[in-house]
């Protein structure tokens, strides 16, 4: 303990230069420290490879990767949505990885067709409703949320958020520009309040009665169910999940994923880490720690995930979400979605 | 005086004061210029889209937010400064330093904390509904997550800038001026409005401009509250619309606006000079407050302290009590150490540069130096992420160019020498926060009359000697203030730290942000509280110094 402390105090002195050691791998991660470090530590324990980590916002990390260019120390880029991975690939900072393990454990729709990036956990953005005031029969699809019966009853966060941008991009794929703009305008009309806060805030507002339905990623409800805070658990108890568009294209999903960088100085280690993250142990960890769905269909679900039931997912190529992101933002701007 | 200076221009030490400021300005301007260079790239038809849809909101909301914060910080800052420096009432000694404490709380943390308490689903409103049986829409309650809420949150943590500088100025005001005012029959109110406040204008304006620039650069609070301002617009355009030229053009507009404000303010007091006639040996004549007046003074200062610090800090403490077992471990100490190390180095470096610039301007008040000083202080109004990218690009360019050259000439690779190191990070702090120490140092220097310089030169001192033996001792309070302000600012700084930090190097602000932005407020509270504690310590130490080093003590 003392040595560890001493070492961590001396780290800054050593960091004035960036020197590379042989048995290590460098990670730029948009997944926050708390949601990735435990996995990385397990990888280090199993393989003896030291993992060096910088966390940050995906766009900023991508910018750093681009400006560092061929001298970038980063081996692996981890993001929390496919759109950024698409953007990284388009910027030419990723490289293709041929790995039988990755091919076997990750379904084709959750990885780049040219193997530049790989999804590692699935995040579903769906309708969360207040059980007291909404019957599930009243709900059907994302499109139907524009119905006037939901006037002043819908909570959703700001359109500056990437999850909403991706959702709108998926609507663009399914319904086209005209209908999507119409949809966004209809949705805005039904807002119970101006968009504010995060996903968890929308669920809480619905539980407290400020609105009746919220659009949110499911794992936020999962962490609320298992919260240390009694009020959060109580609020979560009032809410239930509805899977929309089951008769049609399915629920909008996104992935958190990873990619090996073009400049990777420790390419082999990076691929090993990638394979580890797609492996059984890591895949179970996503569900156990953050209630995300494993991308590997052979890995069992946690009790919380099972309690929400199975559902059909929208199977569009996730690269499209990145490609259509600017258009989605423009549509949301025009719709007055703050 | 000009003859005294020109006779010195041949000396070697003078080169530093003559060419140092422009050199620093060029260095500090690089990141902003890098961003500006994107302005020349065509942004496509996106501008039409912005103008048709959101630009009006960005401009109007930013202006409203600035107005709100200006009203808030001025009324809180100036009134508290006047009360604690010029009046006597119970608790004054405590308030003197305690009123600086809100500065240690990052704006987005106070925003999260108050939302946790005052939101519709928060404990207060839930309790209210339980007592009354009301539902949503049955009653009116101020909406915390709104433009007004954001202005209030920012005012509560930014007023100390105004308070600190106004207070220092009140204390340093020539005692005879105030005495003259009183012998002329002016009561406390008239002395305040007709004499003290006008005399303190440069200090108050310096504090206000810091608060407003911080407001313009704020991202965390407005983003969480769903208020679309210029800053959120820059990021939306940059990342959401994937259009960096348009985002750079928006940043340039923001900077142009700030520049205009600064110039307007300087122009409005172009014929005024604000000097004091040397160091005072007696303490100011304090107004004794009794009865209702004393209670009102106590109420004002106490209310501000309660809202700005006690309430949010207690909430953090309560949360932290429940979670510290999981959240505080050996690595937590390292976080604290990293934060302290960065804040201490950056504040020292910023003070040195500010002295170079401020004193250089005093010695050679020529257009080049004046412009240099202005440019060097521009970074404060630019959102941290924008500065960080502006720092990242030239550093990476330098590293990669050197590396390529070495590869072709000597077949060796230098890799990245500066990118991804603490050097790059410290540089970005300087670009961002130099304005803070510069404003404070300039305000301190400005209060020392020119006759002091002339007297010192006539005794045969060199500029550095005059600075070291005459000016620095006279403005020790300002120097400490400059150190303190940058220290606390760096401690709270997030975006640049997030982007530019080296591997395995986290700070308290990064840890707080990661947990808080994941809506894990309770888990974030320990790190947030640690920021407050690390920030509070120097606040207390230095405010004592300001008191001791200001006027003689009663």
Image (spheres, coloured by chain):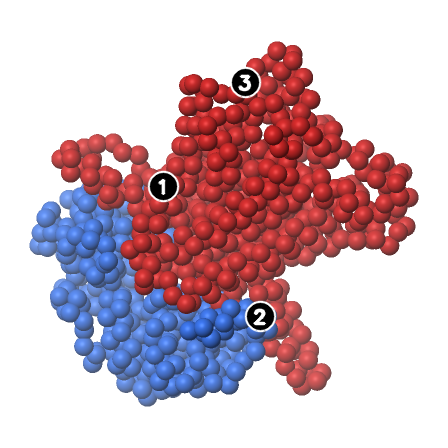
Chain colours: A blue, B red
Q: Secondary structure at mark 3?
A: helix
Q: Quadrant of the N terminus of chain B?
A: top right
Mark-to-mark CA distance, 2 and 3: 55 Å
Mark closer to the chain start, 1 or 3: 3
Q: Which residue is mark 1?
A: B311
Q: Which residue is mark 3?
A: B189
Residue at image position (52%, 65%) is B501
Left or right position of B501 against B279: left
Is label 2 in contact with label 3 (beta carbons under 8 Å)? no
What subunit carries mark 3? B
Count residues near mark 1 (Cα–Cα under 10 Å), then give few for <14, some for 14-19, many for 20+. some
Q: Chain of mark 1?
A: B
- For label 2, the residue is A13
Q: Position of residue B378 (x, y in %)?
A: 61, 47
Name the foreground residue: B19 vs B464: B464
Asked whether the beta carbons under mark 1 and mark 3 sit within 8 Å of each other, the answer is no
Q: Residues within 10 Å of mark 3 (few under 14, many from 20)?
A: few
Q: Residue at x 81, y 38 (%)?
A: B453
Up/down of A305 relative to B184, above or below? below
Quarter of the image where the C terminus of chain B is located:
top right
* Residue ID at (16%, 59%): A241
User: Position of B399 compared to A295: left or right?
Assistant: right
């Amino acid at each position: 303990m003392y040595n560890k402390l001493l070492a961590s105090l001396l780290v800054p002195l050593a960091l004035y230069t960036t020197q590379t050691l042989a048995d290590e791998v460098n990670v730029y991660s948009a997944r926050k420290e708390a949601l990735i470090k435990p996995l990385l530590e397990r990888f280090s324990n199993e393989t003896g490879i030291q993992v060096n980590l910088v966390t940050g916002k995906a766009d900023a990390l991508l910018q750093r990767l681009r400006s560092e260019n061929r001298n970038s120390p980063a081996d692996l880029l981890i993001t929390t949505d496919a759109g950024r991975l698409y953007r990284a690939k388009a910027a030419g900072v990723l490289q293709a990885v041929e790995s039988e393990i990755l091919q076997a454990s990750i379904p084709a729709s959750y990885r780049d067709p040219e193997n530049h990036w790989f999804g590692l956990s699935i995040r579903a953005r769906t309708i969360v409703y207040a059980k007291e005031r909404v019957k599930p029969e009243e709900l059907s699809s994302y499109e139907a949320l524009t119905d006037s019966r939901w006037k002043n009853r819908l909570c959703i966060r700001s359109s500056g958020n990437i999850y909403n941008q991706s959702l709108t991009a998926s609507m663009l794929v399914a319904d086209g520009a005209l209908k999507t703009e119409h949809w966004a305008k209809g949705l805005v009309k039904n807002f119970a309040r101006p968009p504010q806060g995060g996903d968890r805030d929308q669920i809480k507002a619905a539980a407290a009665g400020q609105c009746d339905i919220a659009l949110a990623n499911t794992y936020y409800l999962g962490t609320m169910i298992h919260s240390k805070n009694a009020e959060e658990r109580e609020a979560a108890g009032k809410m239930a999940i509805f899977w929309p568009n089951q008769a049609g294209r399915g629920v909008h999903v996104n992935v958190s994923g990873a990619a090996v960088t073009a400049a990777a100085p420790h390419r082999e280690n990076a691929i090993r880490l990638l394979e580890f993250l797609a492996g059984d142990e890591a895949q179970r960890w996503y569900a156990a720690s953050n209630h995300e769905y494993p991308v590997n269909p052979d890995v069992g679900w946690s009790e919380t995930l099972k309690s929400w039931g199975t559902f059909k997912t929208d199977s569009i190529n996730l690269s499209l979400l990145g490609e259509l992101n600017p258009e989605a933002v423009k549509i949301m701007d025009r719709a007055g979605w703050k | 005086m000009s003859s005294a200076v020109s006779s010195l221009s041949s000396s070697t030490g003078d080169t530093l004061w003559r060419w140092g400021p422009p050199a620093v300005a060029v260095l500090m301007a690089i990141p902003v210029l890098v961003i500006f260079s994107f302005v020349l790239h065509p942004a496509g038809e996106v501008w039409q889209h912005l103008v048709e849809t959101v630009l009006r909101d960005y401009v109007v909301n930013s202006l409203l937010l600035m107005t709100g914060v200006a009203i808030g910080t001025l009324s809180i800052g100036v009134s508290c400064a006047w009360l604690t420096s010029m009046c006597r009432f119970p608790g004054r000694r405590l308030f003197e330093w305690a009123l600086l404490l809100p500065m240690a709380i990052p704006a987005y943390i106070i925003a999260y904390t108050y939302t946790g308490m005052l939101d519709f689903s928060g404990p207060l409103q839930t309790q209210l509904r339980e007592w009354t049986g009301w539902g949503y829409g049955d009653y009116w309650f101020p909406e915390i997550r709104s433009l007004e809420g954001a202005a209030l949150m920012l005012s509560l943590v930014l007023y100390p800038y105004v308070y600190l500088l106004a207070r220092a100025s009140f204390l340093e005001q020539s005692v005879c001026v105030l005495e003259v005012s009183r012998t002329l029959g002016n009561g406390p109110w008239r002395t305040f409005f007709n004499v003290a406040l006008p005399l303190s204008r440069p200090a108050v304006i310096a504090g206000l401009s810091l608060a407003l620039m911080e407001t313009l650069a704020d991202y965390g609070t407005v983003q969480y509250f769903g208020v679309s301002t210029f800053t959120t617009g820059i990021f939306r355009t940059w990342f959401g619309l994937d259009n960096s030229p348009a985002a750079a053009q928006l940043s340039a507009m923001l900077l142009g606006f700030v520049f205009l404000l600064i110039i307007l303010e300087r122009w409005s007091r172009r014929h005024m000079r604000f000097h004091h006639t040397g160091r005072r040996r007696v303490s100011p004549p304090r107004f004794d407050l009794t009865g209702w007046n004393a209670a009102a003074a106590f109420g004002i200062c106490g209310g501000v302290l309660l809202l700005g610090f006690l309430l949010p800090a207690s909430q953090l403490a309560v949360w932290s009590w429940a979670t510290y077992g999981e959240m505080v471990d050996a690595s937590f100490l390292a976080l604290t150490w990293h934060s302290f190390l960065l804040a201490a180095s950056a504040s020292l470096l910023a003070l040195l540069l500010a002295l170079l610039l401020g004193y250089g301007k005093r010695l050679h008040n020529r257009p080049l130096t004046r412009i240099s000083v202005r440019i060097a202080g521009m970074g404060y109004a630019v959102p941290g992420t924008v500065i960080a990218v502006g720092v990242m690009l030239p550093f990476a360019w330098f590293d990669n160019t050197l590396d390529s050259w070495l590869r072709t000439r000597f077949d060796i690779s230098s890799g990245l020498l500066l990118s991804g190191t603490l050097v790059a990070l410290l540089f970005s702090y300087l670009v961002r926060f130099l304005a803070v120490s510069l404003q404070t140092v300039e305000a301190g220097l400005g209060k020392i009359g020119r006759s002091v310089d002339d007297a010192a030169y006539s005794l045969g001192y060199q500029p550095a000697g005059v600075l070291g033996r005459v000016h620095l001792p006279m403005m020790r309070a300002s120097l400490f203030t400059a150190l303190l302000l940058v220290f606390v600012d760096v401690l709270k700084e997030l975006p640049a730290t997030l982007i530019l930090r080296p591997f395995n190097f986290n700070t308290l602000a990064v840890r707080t942000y990661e947990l808080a932005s994941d809506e894990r407020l309770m888990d974030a509270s320990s790190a947030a509280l640690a920021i407050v504690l690390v920030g509070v310590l120097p606040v207390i130490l230095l405010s004592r110094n300001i008191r001791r080093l200001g006027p003689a003590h009663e």
